[in-house]
Image (tube, rainbow, N blue to C red):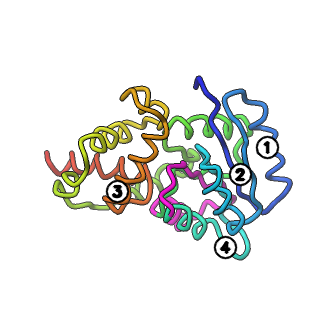
Amino acid sequence: MSEQATVMIVDDHPLLRKGLRQLIEMEDELLLIAEASSGIEAIPLALEHEPDLIILDLNMPDMNGIETLAKIREQSLASRIVVYSVSDQDEDVVAAITGGADGYLLKDMEPEDVVEKIKQAVLGKMVISDRLTEVLATALRHPQKNDSNLYDTLTTREQEILQLIAKGMSNKLIARELNISDGTVKVHVKHLLKKMNLRSRVEAAVWVVNQKQVGK
């Protein structure tokens, strides 16, 4: 990563936020730009800063992580969102991923592993704790009909960007590949997700893969 990736932390536990803050501040590639102690506080901050990555706690009072995730996705932000939780329950993992999360990490991970997963997430990769991979596979293995008409509603540029998203490329890498600005990529991503009624880049990537499988 040649530029710093911006990160926002959302967690109601001050000690946890402090720990994550210290981990992020030790990495030259990462820049912490905002912290929120609740989902209600997080939404306007996310809109204001549009961070590259949001690390989101699952269990919070008033508005939990799944509800916060849904509210942020409604705003069509291009930010990648990774849930960071103590829960390894199947239903929580499935709810997060199908709700538009770009990953799911457990809080009992080793600090160095958390940092590595964060770096992977800002590069556009799906990240998940190792012992949850089977749950993730099940969550994403839902049937989707072949809908080429939906693809045809996209502009040529949006189709190009969708294919690059499916390859796991971040906005920065897509911008470099297409020789356009990061801001332009963000706008295109927002538009194509809205047109296709998808909640996240992960859903978009899965949609592309499923269309190829159906077309075989």
Looking at marks 4 and 3 on the same chain, the residue that comes earlier in the sequence is marked by 4
Looking at marks 3 and 2 on the same chain, the residue that comes earlier in the sequence is marked by 2
**9 on left or right of 131:** right
Residue 32: where, in percent of width, then height? 73, 42
The residues tagged by marks 2 and 1 sit, at their Cα atoms, a distance apart of 8 Å
Whether 185 is among the magenta residues is no
Q: Around disc 4, counting alpha carbons within 10 Å, would you say few (fewer than 14), some (14 to 19), or many (20 or more)?
A: some
- Secondary element under disc 4, as helix, strand or loop, is loop
The residues tagged by marks 4 and 3 sit, at their Cα atoms, a distance apart of 28 Å
> Is there CB contact under 8 Å for labels 2 and 1?
yes
| Residue type beneath disc 2 | Ile
The residues tagged by marks 4 and 2 sit, at their Cα atoms, a distance apart of 15 Å
Looking at marks 3 and 1 on the same chain, the residue that comes earlier in the sequence is marked by 1
Identify the disc placed on residue 141: 3
The span picked out in magenta is 75-98
Residue 119: where, in percent of width, then height? 61, 35
Residue that badge 4 annotates? 63
The residue shown at (28%, 46%) is 209
Residue that badge 1 annotates? 21
Residue that badge 2 annotates? 9
Q: Around disc 1, counting alpha carbons within 10 Å, would you say few (fewer than 14), some (14 to 19), or many (20 or more)?
A: some
Residue 165: where, in percent of width, then height? 38, 41
